[in-house]
Amino acid sequence: MREVINSLELYRNKLLTLYRNKFGEQIDFEFLMDNQIIVTVPKELLVSACLYTQQTLKAPLVDMIGTDEREIDECYGLYYVFASNDLDLFITISTRVERDNPAFPSVTPAIHAAHWYEREVKDMLGVHPIGHPDPKRLVRHFWSKEVHPLRKDIPKGMKLPRTDKELPFKQVKGEGIFQVPVGPIHAGIIEPGHFRFSVQGEYIINLEAKLFYTHRGIEKLAEEMNFHQALPLVERICGVCSFSHSTSYCQAVEKLAGTEIPDRARYIRTIILELERLYNHLGDVGNICAGTGFTFGISQGSRLKETMMQLNERIAGNRYLRGINVPGGVQLDLDNEISMQIRETLTAVAGDFRELKEILVNNDSFNERLIGTGVLPPEIALKMNVVGPGGRASGSRRDVRKNHPYAAYSNTEFQVPSYTAGDVKSRLLVRIDEIEESFGIISQALAAIPGGKLNSALGPIKPQSYALGYTESPRGENIHWVMAGQGNTIFRYRVRSASYTNWPAVQAAVPGNMVPDFPFINKSFELFYSCLGR
Amino acid sequence: MGFVYIVLHLILLLLLAPLVEGTIRKTKAFWQNREGPGLLQPYYNLIKYLKKDSVISDNASWLYWSAPYLTFASIAAAALLIPSVSPDMTISFAGDIILLCYLFAFARFYMALAGLDTGSAFGGMGSSREMFISAMVEPVMFLALFSIALKVNSTDLSVIAGATASIGLGLMNPSHILAMIAMFIVSLAETGRIPIDNPDTHLELTMVHEGMLLEYSGKPLALMQYSAMLKQMLILTLLGNVFLPWGGLPSIDYIGLLSGSLIYIVKIFILALITATVEIANNKLRIFRVPGLLMTAFFLAGLAVVVQLLLKG
């Protein structure tokens, strides 16, 4: 461990020299919480600093946060977060945007992954990215253009004025090209999202998704709450990634407070995180079968998922693993009896799953539908910074559990599966392999779990300090960014879920495929609408 | 007397059709390790739809509301042509296999029009796919039936069924087996089953038959679904009575009719079990692979005709 920190130390100094040489004395440096570096640059240098970080330091853009800090220094703050692929290091390029001129040079033309982030900042804060290639509304497409809810002068709970004008879709025109509108209300019991296909016969030429229909204002609601109060809110950002979200949030708060959580809590978090991955992946493997009409796969997938969820209920008292995390550790212990139950259930589920796997992987008519369908080319996945199984099926090897270890992942052995074909089959295989790894991680963690306390008290938190929390949820990395306010409250809270980064990837993977293939291409990414409607 | 038998025949088909659907669903549930809804569920569904109000799109024309009646009427007319228990229980004086195929085509054509009528994207997609598939299904059905017709020198279904029933296993020559396989593939397509269509999906973008019905609710929906069940029953009856020469010709008395009904029902339910099992073991084909499957059926049926001609000398 010592060595890693030393080399990080060296690396920081090296970085400092690199940035100084490149940009001179106009930039400020700050080191935060052992693995975060904040580089503050003037607005004019924003694009070149971001590009430099991404290209020279091989760090993809993973999040971008806008804040309204006018009450402090009459400025809006912008924070572009890059995560190193080689080191456990996050580099934040931050800049200030003056109150009177709420505009900044857009990074999107240089770094595609910034596309949605900058549009969201424009919608929610009214800070305009100048030179953004597609600056139309993203989040608030049904609200009036004039109101920016994340500004501090908009009170919480205000009913935002709606607009009557529908945001137009991009349409492909030509002979024999039809528009197929799907949604926002769907036939299954799922959330709202409008998909607009331009099709020629059965082939899709273009797909545009209009999402963000269920904006709940969670980020706004969390402001001014104290850190413990906000937790139930965080657990409800998403149903099935509830524990990943709460872990991300708690980690961010713990970093702010400089609190080390007890070892027992680290192991319990690891076990629960993997249980969450298991029930999700098992259900998702089955769901992919729904699109091809392979009913056997659907019912076996849902049966295994249900078994896991019943286990969840015995552990946590609820099926979605809520109420376990607290900032500072966990509040629920895994006693011997429940550990035995976990072991027994997993043995049974693993046996059944392997049988199912054999059937799915060897069924010709199933493979015929999956192979070569919904291809997301690796170079596009890289540009969009596609995360989770979606990214790892397209050549990425990024997994937060390995790249930026948290909880007890540095103490467990596991592999990160990666495929390069980028089709539905690869995404299915990534999930199947990850299920096997999760069985391994849980049994290692159960065997090695130390005794001791469950949680530690939080230390004092300095106002306007900020930190990142991150987990590898079943769908990819969930990154939470928390900025503290006065008196142990939240000043700004930003949630970037895996679904947020991966939705644009669906729009990239679908064109060229047939209309009836869309449902399982979509399912193979398995994204959520609610993670967008924060 | 003949008229009474024809009415009895129609009542039998109408009564059993939902049960056959229920059997297929139950069998599928069994293969999925599920309990599944009861055998009678399709009846309950129909009763439920009949009690509900119907929501009709503002864009719908007379095509929309007339389609359920016309579809049902043409399928019911087709039912009168296909012998079930005894070959004598049909109105064979009115038409033969050619009329039968055209009655099916008429129902399909009307349903496709109704799918397009409301202007919904899913209805249009369903209709266009249905037409695409049926363009290949109809010739196969004709050819398969013709190979049998050649054998018995008649296109009259009651003559054909009478001959198959009385000749029995002696009919099982290579031509017959080829035609039977072709007809089975046709039956999967005609009844909207996997691998060609998926009757149980809620995914609008993948639908064929269900896509056309998506705008229907309440009583018209009940009629549309009932038509589909009845058509499925007819296709299975055709398969059972024309292509499975087994059971003998029942005599026209109470015992004969009773045993004939029993044999008929057993045949239909065995075919339903086979259909459900084929469905569970397969995935839906990509729609552009469907022609491949149907072409196979077409060649089998064509071969059946050729072999039949050769055998006849």
Image: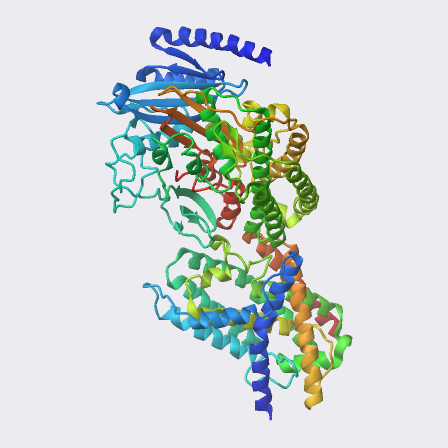
Q: Residue at x 25, y 36 (%)?
A: A147
Determine which quarter of the picture holds residue B242: bottom right
Task: Tell me if I can see residue A184 in this picture.
Answer: yes
Question: Where's residue A203, x and y in %?
Answer: 47, 47
Q: In this view, does A249 lie to the left or right of A408?
A: left
Whether residue A479 is situated above or below residue A86 in the rendered picture: below
Quadrant of image for the N terminus of chain A: top right
Tell me the quarter of the picture where residue B78 sits: bottom right
Q: Up-down: is B106 above or below A29?
A: below
* Residue toward you, A518 or A2: A2
Name the residue located 31 percent from the left edge and 34 percent from the top edge.
A123
- Along the horizontal axis of the image, is A459 left or right of A492? right
Tell me if residue B225 comes above or below residue A70 in the rendering: below
Depth check, front residue: A135 or A439: A439
**Is residue A385 something one can see in this rendering?**
no
x and y, in percent, of residue A153 in the image:
24, 31
Where residue A494 appears, x then y in whole percent? 39, 30
Residue depicted at x 48% and y 8%: A14
Q: Which image quarter holds the C terminus of chain A?
A: top left
Q: Where is residue B261 in the image (x, y as percent from the top left)?
A: 67, 81
Say which of B309 and A429 sits in front: A429
